[in-house]
Amino acid sequence: MFWACFVVVLGKDTSWDFRNYHWYGPYAFLTGRMGLDVAVAHQGSWYNPFLDIPFYLLASHTTSWIALGVMGAVQGANIVPVYLMAREGLVLSERKLAAGALATASMFGALTLSELGTTYYDTVMSLFWLTSLAILIVHRDTLRTGTLRKAGVIAAIAGFITGMAMGLKLPEMPFCIGFAAALLALGGSARHQVVRLAAGGIAGVIGFSIFALPWMAHVYQLTGNPLFPYWNDYWKSPLALNATYRDLRFVPRLLNHQLFFPVYFSIDWHIADDLSFQDFRVCVAYFAVIAALGLLALRRHNRDPLVAGSVALPLFAFAATSYFTWLKFFAIYRYIVGYEILAPLLIVAAVGLFPPARRIRYMILAALAFAILVTARSDFLERAPLGDPYIQAAIPPIARPDKTMVVMTGDAPMGFIVTQLPPQIPVLRIDGWMVQPRDGTQITASMKGRVGRHVRLGGDLYLIADATDMSRARDALSDYNLAIRWSECQQFDTNLVGTYQWCPLAMKS
């Protein structure tokens, strides 16, 4: 309830991604616009919309405070699997009380707080893999020494949940690898190991398939690339360039950057994200776990741990494996913001293996907690006031919607505006991150053909562009042999952020 109220007080998400595709994507899917619009949300136009549909339906059919409250409650539920793992693992006299305190601390990471109530969904996806991890921890004895049937069923349930996460959001892939490592780290006989991995892996593939394959098949039918436009250098869809389209800006190339990446992004968030934050908890967990694993390998660890070894080892295996997989493929911090949630438990488990006496270890943990707390900074994303309907745009009246086409230009996120247009109007983004008028792709050639036919048939053509980016709009339209009728342009606002231009277009004479 606290997190639901907290999110409602913050207000509506106005983030770039929300305005780009998190609102437009489910709308386009539910109204069958995939064949009508083109590249409205840049690359996000082809993202799996299934994750966005629940919030879209809630916000569209209830009030904004209900939709945001539900979002906050779901994100706040991350505290539950952390509590269960802490309760199972802590070797303390006041175990439940300490587990509650640790779980509460887990929700106060810098970017965790900033993302609450937003549709980035990183703190929704973390609920999936944290729950899977908690299932393994709570049932570790059965998974290690119980009947093979019970071990297989439990591993399958946890694997299915983890697979669902990747099916809904592909960047969750590292946590599937981490989940497999945690299954191995549970120990037990070779037969138990094989059964756990097989059951967890098969169920994970099923979970992924249910939530990803139908959409991937649909996108493949439309484009010839099930992950369009990503990895198009492999799939070679003629609609896009022969390129990966992946965001590799943050992936470290040098060895010292790879080894000390948590130090770099903890000091300067630009190293690993577009969202500002400062929090050293992941950095501390990184080095503490490395130190603890070294002590275990050398058999120099404390025989009086703060977290039971049967819990600490799967946690370490999961965290290390998924982290290094993430570092190789993405290195975008918000994709592992769930590590902010898991970090307090990882730190306690790791420091608990250090050689000093228990009292000294408590002092180390207290010092680390204080240092993390005083250096953390949450830069909350811009929010808009509550109000219904959830999205509003003051688009000027359209005289002939049945004979109207709209084009978009520039990089600004404007997908949410499309939901406010009459549904019969096609929208083509002829210029942006995904396509440009001179890129030579079939998708651009197709749009040029559609625009030309529409004008020749006497249809009305309009431009929507960010009001601050009209010079780019003019240049892009020139490549389509179109001109802006400047004297007839009108500015309009939305209930989120931004001012936009609505301009009639004409063929150049």
Image (cartoon, rainbow, N blue to C red):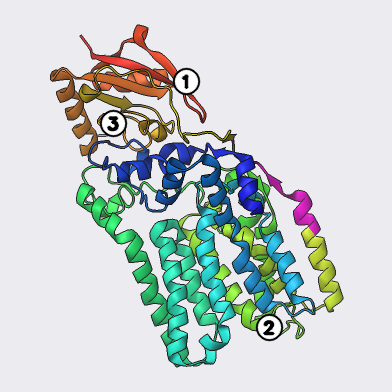
User: Marks 1 and 3, how far apart in space?
Assistant: 20 Å
User: Which of the 4 quarters of the picture holds residue 100?
Assistant: bottom right
Horizontally, residue 442 falls left or right of residue 369, namely left
Q: State the extent of the magenta-drawn residues as a range.
A: 370-382
Q: Are marks 2 and 1 in contact (CB under 8 Å)?
A: no
> Disc 2 marks which amino acid?
Leu
User: Which of the 4 quarters of the picture holds residue 85?
Assistant: bottom right
- Could you tell me which residue is drawn at 47 percent across and 20 percent down? 468
Numbered circle sitting on residue 468: 1
Nearest the viewer among 238 and 162 is 162
- Could you tell me which residue is drawn at 42 percent across and 62 percent down? 166
Q: Which residue is mark 2?
A: 298
User: Marks 2 and 3, how far apart in space?
Assistant: 61 Å
Q: Position of residue 76 (x, y in %)?
A: 60, 56
Of label 1 and label 3, which has the lower sequence position? 3
Horizontally, residue 395 falls left or right of residue 126, namely left
Q: Which residue is mark 3?
A: 428
Q: Residues within 10 Å of mark 1 (few under 14, many from 20)?
A: some
- Could you tell me which residue is drawn at 36 percent across and 32 percent down? 418
User: Which of the 4 quarters of the picture holds residue 476?
Assistant: top left
Nearest the viewer among 339 and 423 is 423
Residue 84, compared with residue 502, is above or below; it is below
Q: Residues within 10 Å of mark 3 (few under 14, many from 20)?
A: many
